[in-house]
Image (tube, rainbow, N blue to C red):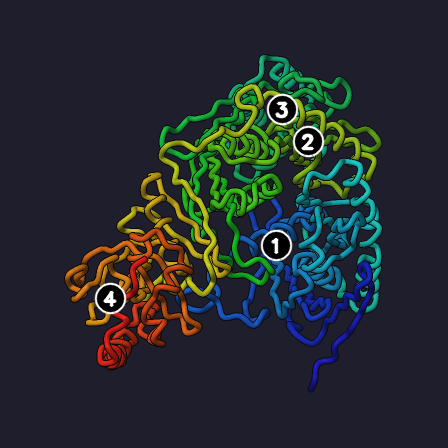
Amino acid sequence: MKPEAKHFSTMLGNKEVSFETGRVARLAGGSVIVRQGDTMMFAAATLGEARDGIDFFPLTVSYEERMYAGGKIPGSFFRREGRPSTDATLVARLTDRPLRPLFPDGMRNEVQVILMSFSADDENPLDMLAINAASAALMISDIPFDGPVGAVRIGFVDGNLVVNPTFAEMAESSLDLRVAGTKEAILMVEAGANEVTEILMVEALQLAHESIQPIIETQERMAAEIGKPKREIKYEQLDKNLVELSNQRMGSRITALLDQPYSKENLYGGMDELKAAFLEEMAAGEELTNERTAELSQAFGEAERTIIRERILNEGKRPDNRKVFEVREIYSETDVSPRAHGSALFTRGETQVLTFATLGTPKEAQELDNLNSQDSKRYMHHYNFPPFSTGETRRVGGQSRREIGHGALAERALEPVIPDEVEFPYTIRLVSEVMASNGSSSMASVCASTLALMDTGVPITNPVSGVAMGLIKEGDRYAILTDILGTEDHLGDMDFKVAGTRNGITALQMDMKISGITSEIMAEALKRAQDARLYILSKMMETINEPRPSLKAHVPRIESIKVPIDKIGAIIGPGGKNIRALQEETNTKIDIDDDGNVFIASTSGVGFEEARDRILALTETAEIGKIYTGKCVRVADFGAFIEILPGIDGLVHVSQLASERVEKVEDVVNVGDELTVMVIDISSEGKIRLSRKALLEGWSAEEAREHDSPRKSGGNSRGGQRSGGDRRSGGDRRSSGDRRSSGDRRSGGGDRRPPRN
């Protein structure tokens, strides 16, 4: 029996978006295929059993990027999809962030959302469809979920905000804003921008929230018409009486700890001691069960959370006693590593990041194997978060999702100021090592990376700084916090990161732990962030205020030259023989683009000059009137063939070898000898006539042609050109030329004796 599919559709911007369910994956809790154009995203949401002994909600969102969706075979050795790509990981994180706050508090059942690309055209991006598909699958499933969520991308093209832009439109856009939210408020923001203003950003956010309303309404209609009844599950709930008891017993001691001089170690260590004291007092000499210990620990944690938040809201007192708008103390330095191409250390409070910069050749750009329109990138930012940075121990392995996400955010923040390849033909890699973390290490990596780029000598268009903002909100009361601590991030309601230059925003990321915020709060947070960014930037400029005028001595110099496209093969040579030999002999790295741009990288100016000169020689074309010094490659009785350029030779007739009469060619030149000659003619077939006599007599090319005896007797076919090292053509010329020269000699040999002027 053919499954019956249900279809729903709406408009997102000026494009139709359709939702289909019931045709596939009918055993999942809920499944949906979302389609826009020829792009299709599948989502399945499934509810598992409750996990015992945990104090968090076990939600997993995975995106399986299937290359068949774009008609591609994976480029890996096994020719199948392996570990998620960076883009796939970022899409999974992007989907997780707006969904997570909308599950009921105390939920401990496993929820798994799996996304798969079914089709990918060259017009419509997949990432926003992923959020909409996941939300729709949850809405029609049996999983408790306080959605729906709608998501949209906003671009800024030719002075206009564009809703749901295509790949082509995004290529021309100075803004890439991705927003997810509910009917009432915005939940998640991710943006990259080319220095846009805060005013434009707020306008774009408002447009985004308006634009997702049809998507939200469609999901509500789907849930009403075909949604499954929500499953009854058990929620973990705090004992309010126990929380109150914790407040009574420990409140004054928590407050006293918060009034002491601040350090992360003192605060976290002090809270651990107070919690241990609370557990001991509540045990009253009896051994606590694991369940009771977890219950008491949660009650103490809630008391801590309440006290810290109320101090901020009522008194403006933060854990480190800063004002709500105050930035922590900043220190920075550059040139930390003597052999890295550039390095910088940035410290803000107890957060510290050390960034290293490396410059490489164009061929070291990263090749991308994904379903996006971008197939490579020459600027990369990697972020590492080792366990010692938080004073902890844990397994050290590959990059976590968090590390990938923070690296991508910093990369997005700096990308608008990276010089283009024509101006600065390097591949650039930045690695940010978090040395210590107590709040917003991602924005510290932006600051450290800006300093490292300037220390390297990369001519960035503007320096970039970043700051993380927080929010404490209870009802209508709220406080926006500048430069949040780890505690404020953990106990707060918002993590709002903003990076930019003096001119505007380059990156923005917002995550909410509550059901959303209004555009008014967002605008206020952006203004506070702008003030903080500019202050941080001014402190950074005290260390280094512009890129160094030159690269360090051990950095490879890369310069480019342009060669004719039809000469690329001559540079590369058969099987790459020429270019390999050239690199080895000159100690350089050479990259050649299909458009004829040749990039030469060398730590030695001599090596670069030699490589450049040899490449130009390989690609040079003979010019009439130009003088060359070449090697004799063949001697005949009528003249000598001189290789004036690699693979190209011409004929010096015996009459043009010297001012006086030459009886025998070998009297003047032998194979292997060097001879300086002038090009006096090039035939329509490419055969080159050379003259040594023109140089001895001071003739021009025209005068030399007038005195060229073979031309007077009609014998100019003796000249020859050997192109691309083809010696066989020279052999043909020799046999025919021998016959013709014999005829010339029989006619009296007049061409051997040109008149003397």
| Mark 3 vs mark 4, CA separation in Å | 78 Å
Question: Would you call the spot at circle 1 few (<14 residues within 10 Å), some (14-19), or many (20 or more)?
Answer: many
Of the 4 image quadrants, the one containing the N terminus is bottom right
User: Which amino acid, mark 4?
Assistant: Val
Three-letter code for the amino acid on which mark 3 is drawn: Ile
Q: Which mark is residue 654?
A: 4
- How far apart are the two marked residues, 1 and 2, measured between alpha carbons? 23 Å
SS category of the residue bearing label 4:
helix
Crowd class of label 4 (few under 14; some 14 to 19; many from 20; radius 10 Å): many
Note whether 438 is above or below 508 in the view shown: above
Front-lying residue, 633 or 365: 633
Q: Quadrant of residue 569?
A: bottom left
Type of amino acid at the residue the image marks with label 2: Met
Residue labelled with disc 3? 536
The x, y position of residue 315, in whole percent, is: 75, 17
In the image, which is nearer the foreground, mark 3 or mark 1? 3
User: Residue sitting at 46 percent across and 33 percent down?
Assistant: 456
Is 4 or 244 nearer to us in this picture? Answer: 4
N-terminal label among 3 and 4: 3
Quadrant for residue 239, please give it.
top right
Q: Which residue is mark 1?
A: 91
The reply to whether discs 3 and 4 touch (Cβ–Cβ < 8 Å) is: no
Report if the CB atoms under discs 1 and 4 are less than 8 Å apart.
no
Q: Could you say where residue 159 lies in the image, as x and y percent from the top left?
A: 79, 47
Give the mark, 1 or 4, whose residue is nearer the N terminus: 1
385 w.r.t. 478: above or below:
below
Q: Earlier in the sequence, mark 2 or mark 4?
A: 2
Q: Of callouts 3 and 2, which one flags the residue occurring earlier in the amino acid sequence?
A: 2
In the image, what residue occupies the spot 62% across and 21% down?
Answer: 538
The answer to whether 332 is drawn above or below residue 343 in the figure is above
